[in-house]
Image: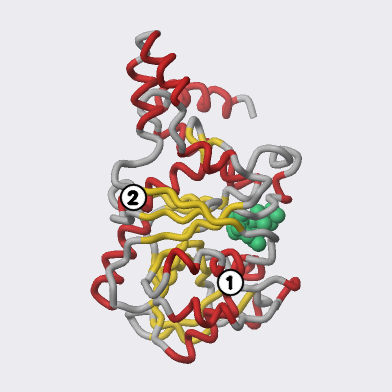
Amino acid sequence: MKPLRKVVIPVAGLGSRFLPATKAVPKELLPVVDKPLIQYIVEEAAEAGITDVVLVTHSAKPAIENHFDKHYELEQELIRRGKDELLEIKRSITPPNVRIIGVRQPETLGLGHAVLCAEPVLRDEPFAVILPDVLMYHPQKGCMAQMVELFNQRQTSLIALEQVDDSEVEKYGIAAVEGDDLRITALVEKPKPADAPSNLSVVGRYIFTPRIMELLQNTLPGAGGEIQLTDAMAELLEEEQMFGYMFDGKSYDCGDKLGYLQANVDYALRNEKLGNDFKQWLNQRCETL
Ligand code: UTP
């Protein structure tokens, strides 16, 4: 199989759970401390050795691609004012060796459809998918870098999994697994706790063999009338082996208001410049709660 060099990041969704913030500002550009979500995601992909970032975007959200574009006037002004540190921050928005490629999803027909929109750029290569509203923190090695390492050994599709409380399985895609190597035997979308085959949820990081694209082409609308990635994955499972990958860091669902707030607090506490002051303030604040 060809080496893994590309990631698909679907960013065409409506972000309705985060209204009113996401009326004019794409959810993917909401900042966690001082950086938009999408920038953390592109950095995670770059750390994994991925060179081609395919953003599946929507006509209402051109600001996402603009974020990664050169802004000549801003750079000239920062140079003129001698703002070297800010200039460096601006210039490092797109990691070196990374190309940002934009494709459009004309209608939000579902995550599976969004991934399918990237097909002309992917051809017959394996590729990663990262959901941009899930931040995955690890102090040493990002989730995608860990998964690419495993992919290089196994050459099979992989899905990042995370343990959730039994009472929470209803909110997620849940995987049934077998053996120490976490071979996936079934995928169930949002099961009732009594029917859940495990408490391992699918958390927004995938690596696929090229076959998934062919399957997506024939995937009919499923739950909610949307073309579901999970449906194509279930078909892939009948043809190829697929494994789970247990991420040992911390994930934040930033598409959800509580998860987003938690991410801001944790990333602020870890921030080199702000961390100590913020911690002090937070400690005092907590005493008065
Ligand atoms: P979500 O369902 O979490 O995001 O899809 P959303 O639709 O933007 O948010 P809500 O549910 O209305 O609040 C996961 C990811 O898939 C993208 C979204 O942009 C998000 O990053 N997506 C979803 C697409 O690109 N196209 C779609 O048709 C659906």
Question: Residue at left 48%, top 34%?
Answer: 35
Q: In the drawing, what numbered circle is on residue 272?
A: none
Q: Which residue is mark 1?
A: 173
Q: Nearer the viewer, residue 118 or 159?
A: 118
Distance, label 1 to label 2, CA atoms, is 27 Å
Q: Position of residue 178 (x, y in %)?
A: 41, 85
Return the x and y of residue 256 as percentages of the image width and height: 64, 50
Q: Is residue 171 above or below residue 182?
A: above
Q: Is residue 227 left or right of residue 98?
A: right
Q: Position of residue 137 (x, y in %)?
A: 41, 49
Q: Quadrant of ligand 1?
A: bottom right
Q: Residue furthest left?
A: 153
Q: Amino acid at mark 1?
A: Gly
Frontmost residue, 24 versus 202: 24
Image-quadrant location for residue 270: top left
Residue at 46 percent across and 63 percent down: it is 129
User: Which residue in the structure is indicated by mark 2?
Assistant: 46
Q: Secondary structure at mark 1?
A: strand
Image quarter hosting the C terminus:
top right
Bin the neighbour count of mark 2 within 10 Å (Cα to Cα): few under 14, some 14-19, many 20 and up: many
Rendered residue at 28%/70% (across/down): 150
